């Protein structure tokens, strides 16, 4: 017996208690005194004694009553009770048995007898206690076995990982979802089992779990047979009793079916937004076809060889632009099946979306992009982010009734924990914020409260379905981000999309991309050329590189565009024009707006040499020029 037995001595006479204390003085016993019945009951409840020596004759509450109450209490019913009585008669013994006493001892005590009985009873009691504890352990084991059986039955993959990502346990659900039998999975890194060794997502999930105690997210997996599965996973940190990390419990639900349905839904929604663009697309295709038809017509008249070349070029550029537009629409309509996460430079996403809007939105709208330098790289599905931007931009277009300013901006934001805590679904760390701002109708607080509900629309039937923003919310959530909206009736609306970023910038991605021509920053450019087709060609080229170009087919049209109050940053002027040559036109325009930069385009080498000496022109570009020559020259002039 390693711990002393607690014995409660109950007697109203202190002298009697002392006698007992002297008799039982022994390191095996812890002796506690009670001077009356109520105190005895209280101490018994507190201490769960191994034995109670109970005097019968006490005022207030006698020993029989105390014994009866002990037996009524579920926790104390088993405590052995020895009645101590001076009345060595049968009557009180019978009463004692009736009350549930276990034994009797009469005063004055026989020392040896007292000690022996106490010893026997405490020993028996401790065996009983051991048996009861054993029964409890068995019950607990039974529970563990039942839980293990449940884990085996679960359809979810329930996996316990070491902190380094190695598999410690792997239930039949995991065998089924991930396709690897448990004996093969044990001890191997999870990344090797489900993602062909690509551990980047595991590393960040383990990091989050260690840091925040849990991680939730989509965990795409590839089975050994090559099938891919999409799971939604919830990882929880398991701790030792002292609080130190011991492992990770990863529960993953198969989402493959769900994701398939979701992909169908997204595709349907993309079709809807293409429908919203259809008018613009048709218009744009006509714009692409017009110069082709025109050039073909001119070619039939058998113009000089120089001209023929130019016409052929117009046809080529226009056709390429048309093909590009069709390609873009098809890629968008087809989209990705499920999620295709890749490292993306946000500036490309913004440029693509802005490019598409510029081609298809009413020309009276000003569409600008505003890209911060050194944007972080995000891990995202390009089709889906394109879909988000396009939905927001179509909404902006509708809110502006075709006139006004639409800006798509991108910037880096590193969220601190306090900020993230206030935004449901947000996490601290580097983010890229994509902002779509319009100068449209804005929204009342009542409308604002409902915009995320699927099928909420304020547009007439045929114009709106109300699923655009619901889709935006879903996609952003799946990317681990969140949306902020600010809107003022009559003033306009900004949607800000926060997407978690890797923290690295795209310089390396950019370097491996095909030659990147310098881009504009949405500046307005006036192109003055009396050859309309060439003018259109330049316009297309500039539109693709984030400039907004207005084409004038001669000095008169140029001056009228100029005096209409359109603010141009740059004019691209052909030297050889009827009525007023490029040099004089430049002078006139700079008189109206001294801040205007003018680039001269000329076919003559001599003029070129001569003019580049004068300060009238910011640059001189020789005809014929390549897209690169022109864009580099413009970039130098505008962005130094
Ligand atoms: N930029 C915006 N300016 C004003 N109202 C907007 C804007 N974007 C969305 N809304 C409001 O939110 C509603 C829901 O938008 P959405 O889910 O895209 O559906 P839909 O465009 O088909 O109506 C719109 O009908 C409109 O009332
Ligand atoms: Mg919409």
Image (tube, rainbow, N blue to C red):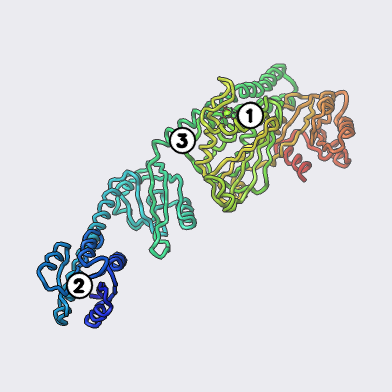
Residue underneath mark 3: 337
Which residue was labeled with disc 1? 321
Mark 1 vs 2, N-terminal side: 2
Of tags 3 and 1, the one toward the viewer is 3
Q: Quadrant of the N terminus?
A: bottom left
Do the numbered discs 3 and 1 sit on residues whose CB atoms are within 8 Å? no
Q: Residue furthest left?
A: 90
**Percent x, y of residue 126:** 21, 70
Q: Position of residue 167 (x, y in %)?
A: 36, 56
User: Which residue is located at x 61 percent, y 38 percent?
Assistant: 485
Near mark 1 (Cα within 10 A), the count class, few <14, some 14-19 or many ≥20, is some
Q: Nearer the viewer, residue 111 or 5?
A: 111
Please tell me the numbered disc located at residue 122.
2
Q: Are marks 2 and 3 in contact (CB under 8 Å)?
A: no
Residue reaching furthest to the front: 59
Instruction: Look at discs 2 and 3 and give the one toward the viewer.
Output: 2
- Tell me: 257 left or right of 22: right
Q: Is residue 590 left or right of residue 374?
A: right
**Residue at left 57%, top 44%?**
499
Front-lying residue, 512 or 189: 189
Ligand 1 sits in quadrant:
top right
């Amino acid at each position: 017996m390693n711990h002393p037995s607690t014995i409660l001595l109950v007697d109203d006479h202190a002298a009697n208690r002392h006698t007992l204390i002297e008799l039982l003085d022994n390191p095996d016993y812890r002796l506690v005194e009670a001077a009356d019945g109520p105190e005895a009951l209280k101490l018994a409840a507190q201490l769960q004694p191994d034995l109670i020596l109970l005097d019968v004759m006490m005022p207030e509450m006698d020993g029989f009553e105390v014994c009866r109450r002990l037996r009524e209490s579920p926790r104390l019913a088993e405590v052995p009770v020895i009645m101590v009585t001076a009345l060595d008669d049968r009557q009180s013994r019978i009463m004692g048995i009736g009350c549930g006493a276990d034994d009797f001892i009469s005063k004055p005590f026989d020392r040896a007898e007292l000690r022996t009985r106490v010893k026997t009873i405490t020993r028996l009691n401790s065996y009983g206690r051991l048996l009861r504890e054993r029964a409890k352990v068995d019950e607990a084991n039974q529970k563990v076995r039942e839980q293990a059986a449940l884990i085996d039955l679960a359809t979810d993959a329930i996996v316990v990982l070491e902190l380094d990502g190695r598999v410690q346990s792997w239930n039949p659900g995991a065998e089924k979802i991930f396709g690897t039998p448990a004996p093969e999975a044990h001890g191997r890194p999870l990344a090797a089992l489900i993602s062909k060794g690509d551990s980047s997502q595991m590393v960040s999930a383990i990091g989050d779990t260690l840091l925040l105690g849990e991680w939730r997210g989509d965990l795409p997996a590839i089975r050994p047979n090559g099938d891919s599965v999409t799971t939604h996973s919830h990882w929880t940190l398991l701790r030792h009793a002292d609080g130190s990390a011991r492992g990770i419990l990863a529960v993953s639900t198969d989402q493959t079916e769900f994701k398939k349905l979701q992909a169908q839904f997204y595709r349907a929604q993309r079709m809807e937004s293409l429908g919203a663009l259809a008018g613009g697309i048709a218009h744009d295709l006509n714009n692409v076809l017009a110069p082709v038809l025109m050039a073909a017509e001119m070619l039939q008249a058998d113009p000089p060889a120089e001209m023929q070349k130019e016409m052929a070029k117009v046809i080529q550029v226009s056709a390429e632009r048309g093909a590009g537009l069709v390609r873009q629409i098809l890629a968008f309509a087809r989209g990705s099946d499920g999620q295709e996460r890749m490292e993306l430079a946000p500036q490309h996403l913004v440029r693509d979306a802005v490019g598409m809007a510029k081609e298809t939105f009413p020309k009276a709208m000003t569409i600008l992009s505003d890209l911060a330098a050194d944007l972080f790289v995000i891990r995202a599905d390009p089709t889906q982010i394109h879909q988000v931007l396009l939905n927001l931009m179509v909404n902006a277009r509708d809110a502006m009734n075709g006139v006004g300013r639409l800006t798509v901006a991108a910037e880096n934001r590193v969220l601190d924990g306090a900020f993230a805590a206030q935004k449901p679904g947000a996490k601290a760390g580097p983010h890229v914020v994509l902002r779509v701002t319009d100068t449209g109708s804005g929204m009342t607080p009542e409308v604002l409260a409902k915009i995320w509900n699927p099928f909420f629309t304020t547009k007439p039937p045929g114009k709106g379905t109300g699923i655009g923003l619901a889709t935006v919310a879903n996609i952003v959530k799946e990317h681990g981000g969140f949306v902020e909206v600010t809107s003022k009736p009559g003033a306009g609306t900004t949607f800000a999309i926060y997407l978690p970023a890797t923290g690295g910038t795209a310089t390396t991605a950019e370097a491996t991309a095909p030659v990147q021509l310098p881009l504009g920053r949405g500046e307005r450019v006036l192109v003055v050329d009396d050859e309309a087709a060439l003018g259109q060609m330049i316009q297309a080229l500039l539109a693709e590189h984030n400039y907004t170009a207005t084409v004038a087919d001669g000095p008169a049209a140029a001056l009228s565009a100029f005096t209409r109050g359109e603010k141009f940053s740059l004019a691209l002027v052909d030297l050889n024009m009827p009525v007023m040559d490029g040099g004089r036109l430049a002078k006139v325009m700079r008189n109206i707006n001294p801040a205007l930069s003018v680039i001269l385009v000329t076919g003559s080498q001599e003029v070129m040499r001569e003019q580049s000496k004068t300060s009238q022109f910011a640059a001189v570009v020789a005809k014929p020029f390549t897209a690169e020559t022109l864009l580099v020259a413009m970039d130098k002039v505008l962005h130094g």
